[in-house]
Amino acid sequence: MADVVVVGGGPAGLSAALFTAKNGLDTTVFDTDETWMHKAHLFNYLGIESEDGTAFMEDAREQVDSFGVDRRQGDAVTDIESTGDGFVVTTEDDEDDVDYVVLATGADRDLAENLGCAFTDEDVVDVDVTMETSVDDAYATGAMVRAEEWQAVISAGDGAAAALNILTKEKGEHFHDFDVPEDAE
């Protein structure tokens, strides 16, 4: 049983996966590679002077892979069901039991609707500041929670917020992912 399943492999999903896997949670990402990043060129992403969106995605995938994420490229999630103590995530060929779900499917809100997540008057998934939906332990990120402001850097922040809240729940205290080199003063 995985600890975390992330549905979507764009900046939000891979950011969530990076934080959870880096901090010891068994993490699976279902990535159909339908991210809008393939149409982008990054000039306004902090830390990146200029990079093609597809190249950025290749770099991001390599980074999450290096932390042991089980990235299921091309495998689409067809349903998610809450079991009361977790979720069953269904694909065409398989079912996975999981403790937490992070939805990072861009403007496609179908899985959130099927799961029973509340929506706002603007017809976006209603989340709190940690990106948790009205369904306990289910998170929504990026374009699915915003009527506008669809930026890669915002989506990546949403993924990080979801992951940090999951890690806080798992560790039983407020969790910060802050690396300090041994030789830092």
Image (cartoon, rainbow, N blue to C red):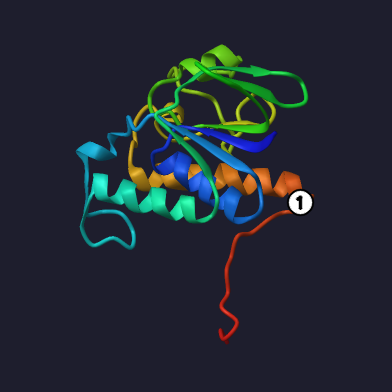
Q: Nearer the viewer, residue 163 or 61?
A: 61
Q: Residue, x 32% and y 49% (percent of image)?
A: 58
Give coordinates of residue 78: x percent, y percent. Answer: 50, 16
Looking at the picture, which amino acid does disc 1 mark?
Lys
What residue is drawn where x is 70% and y is 49%?
A: 168
Give neighbour class at mark 1: few <14, some 14-19, many 20+ (Cα, 10 Å).
Answer: few
Q: Is residue 80 left or right of residue 46?
A: right
Q: Is residue 155 left or right of residue 133?
A: left
User: What's the residue at 40%, 53% (across, down)?
Assistant: 62
Toward the viewer: 95 or 177?
95
Query: Is 140 drawn above or below residue 160 in the view shown?
Result: above
Q: Quadrant of residue 148?
A: top left
What kind of element bears circle 1?
helix
Q: Nearer the viewer, residue 182 or 152?
A: 182
Look at the picture and state if 94 lies above or below 26.
Answer: above
Q: How many marks?
A: 1
Image quadrant containing the N terminus: top right
- Image coordinates for residue 99, horizontal then vertical, percent: 70, 33
Residue 30, horizontal then vertical, whole percent: 48, 32
Which residue ends up furthest to the front in the rendered image? 93
Quarter holding the C terminus is: bottom right
Disc 1: which residue = 171
Image location of residue 74, percent across then percent down: 39, 29
User: Based on the displayed image, in which of its 4 quarters is residue 132 positioned?
Assistant: top right
Which residue corresponds to the image point at 60% horizontal and 82% vertical from the top-left? Answer: 182
